[in-house]
Amino acid sequence: MLSNPRLPQSLMKSTLLAFLTIHLVSGFWSPAAAANRPNILFLFADDLGRYASAYADPSRPSANDIVSTPAFDRIAREGVLATNAFVSAPSCSPCRASLISGRHFFRNGSHSQLHTPWHGDRAADPWNQVRGFALFLQDAGYHIGWSHKMHIAEDRMGGKKNNYRKAGRAVNSFSQKVSGAKDQAAAKEELYDECRKNFRAFLGDRPATSSGPAPFYYSFHPTNTHRKWTKGSGKALWGLDPDGLEGKMPPFLPDVPEVREDLADYLGEGMAFDRCCEVILEELKKTGELDNTLIVISGDHGAPGFPRGKTNCYDFGARVLFAARWPGHIGAKQVVTKPISLIDLAPTFLAAAGLPPEKGMNGQDLLPALKDGDHGKLRGWALIGRETHVNTARGGLPYPMRAIRTDDFLYIVNFTPDRAPMGDPLALATPTPPAYEAIRENTRLTYADVDAGPTKAWMIQHREDPRWETHWNLGFGPRPGEELYDLAKDPHQVTNVANDEAYYETRQRLRAQLMGELEANHDPRLAGDTFDQPPYNRRTKPGQTKR
């Protein structure tokens, strides 16, 4: 383990990456070029990790064995399935900010963290330099819009006027709405129709051009996969028997009925998302433009309310489902195993529209590799990290992590291993600790970087039981300055080999690669406690919060 996780300066020196880009200028487009531009449809689930029946693997039993996701599977079958797609930050707004900017999360100023406003000169906020990729599409004549959650400044994607949800937003409470209905089948259909009508309203606003309707960019961002969902709904609404998960749970989660049911309920919400995607795809097909549309289905990070999920750099927290289809431009039946990042979507969407990447984007246009199936053209690694998630988790301080995920290894630097990775015990350390029900319902009571839910409450209730000591330590215990996982031997990343001499050269190589990328992109964390202080944080010095 490193005695000082800030690492030697000599290991952090590298040349700043240069980006040779061309800006879109007035009059760039000719009518002929405009006529050939594809539509772009982005179906993006909140908090949904890599869960789809297309990922089921008989040699590796998992939760994917019990789900059914025909819409996702179709897109994967007729295009590309990515088995290792990662977010830049496994936290809500930092993930989405990196997605629309095409930048590493730490380059987005006030949007590098969740619930942490800019505490300084607003003019100096790096977020001011960001224009979401949809604005460049709009400049080029695209009709742009989305439905439901953005979780970032909506002006970067066209403003609130572009949020199409006049037909309703009840789909965001899918299991609650359907579970409470007398006729559950009819209640499901009503929610599907809501999605259909919102998409139709968007299509109905498309302006006409001399060559037909304007090309469009539309994204569907429901939040039903974000907690809270209805207990028992996975089985009741989708036939997902929690007992079907026995023996298929990741080794860091207790394989007990309460946790299996919680995971089954989450998977049910993922199936609801897939059915909504199917409805939108059916509407798209009616326009006759299905094959002239680049379609991507993905999620914004891993499972919420489960240890080592959301807010973590492990695969369970940062790896997401990913499939893409565009006949003639993305070869069918491809499986990409090399790591890709969701920051790659911004330059990919721009390239599909014939636009150059915006200056400063870190993402890579995926289309050249996906057109001819030459995956050697891909970058082959993903950079992941986080700072503050819930701002009360540890007295206003972040838990800074940076990681690099390659084909074979996951390497993580925890810059402040003296802090609690999932937050302080808070109310749990008081003379009258909260009961199970309170922990299940209120995220901020204790270990606030893990969302409230039955799994969190169960693990806290059993934290002193020797049978679950290993699970507790993996999920909530302290972490060293460095972590290294050999994915061939340890796909679930539970055995840290950072201090194993057999991995010395691998650790050195990955450390240098990670630190080189961070320095080349001016990560504020490398300057020390920058993210702990204004303007990134309201705290003025350790142990003192500005009132």
Image (cartoon, rainbow, N blue to C red):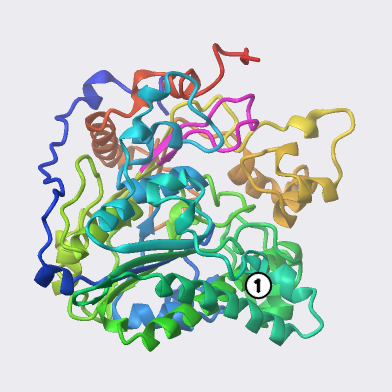
Vertical position of residue 56 compared to residue 467: above or below: below
Could you tell me which residue is drawn at 61 percent across and 58 percent down?
226
Q: Residue 458 appears at what percent x and percent y?
A: 76, 53
Q: Residues within 10 Å of mark 1 (few under 14, many from 20)?
A: some
Q: Quadrant of residue 353?
A: bottom left
Vertical position of residue 392 compared to residue 192: above or below: above
Vertical position of residue 283 compared to residue 218: above or below: below
Q: Nearer the viewer, residue 66 or 19?
A: 19
Vertical position of residue 115 compared to residue 180: above or below: above
Q: Amino acid at mark 1?
A: Glu
Q: For mark 1, what is the residue?
A: 246
Q: Secondary structure at mark 1?
A: loop
Residue 49 seen in this snapshot: no
The residue positioned farthest toward the right in the image shown: 432
Count of numbered circles in the view: 1
Q: Residue 213 appears at what percent x and percent y?
A: 28, 75
Q: Is residue 389 magenta?
A: yes
Give the dominant element type of the magenta stretch: helix, strand or loop: loop
Q: Residue 268 appears at what percent x and percent y?
A: 63, 73
Magenta-tinted stretch: 385-403
Q: Quadrant of residue 233?
A: bottom right
Q: Residue 309 appears at what percent x and percent y?
A: 55, 52
Question: Relative to 45, is 108 on the left or the right?
Answer: left
Q: Quadrant of residue 482?
A: top left
Could you tell me which residue is drawn at 54 percent across and 50 percent down?
310
Question: Relative to 519, is 409 on the left or the right?
Answer: right
Residue 93 seen in this snapshot: yes
Q: In what quadrant of the picture does the C terminus appear?
A: top right
Question: Relative to 365, is 258 on the left or the right?
Answer: right
Q: Is residue 36 magenta?
A: no
Q: In what quadrant of the picture does the N terminus appear?
A: top left
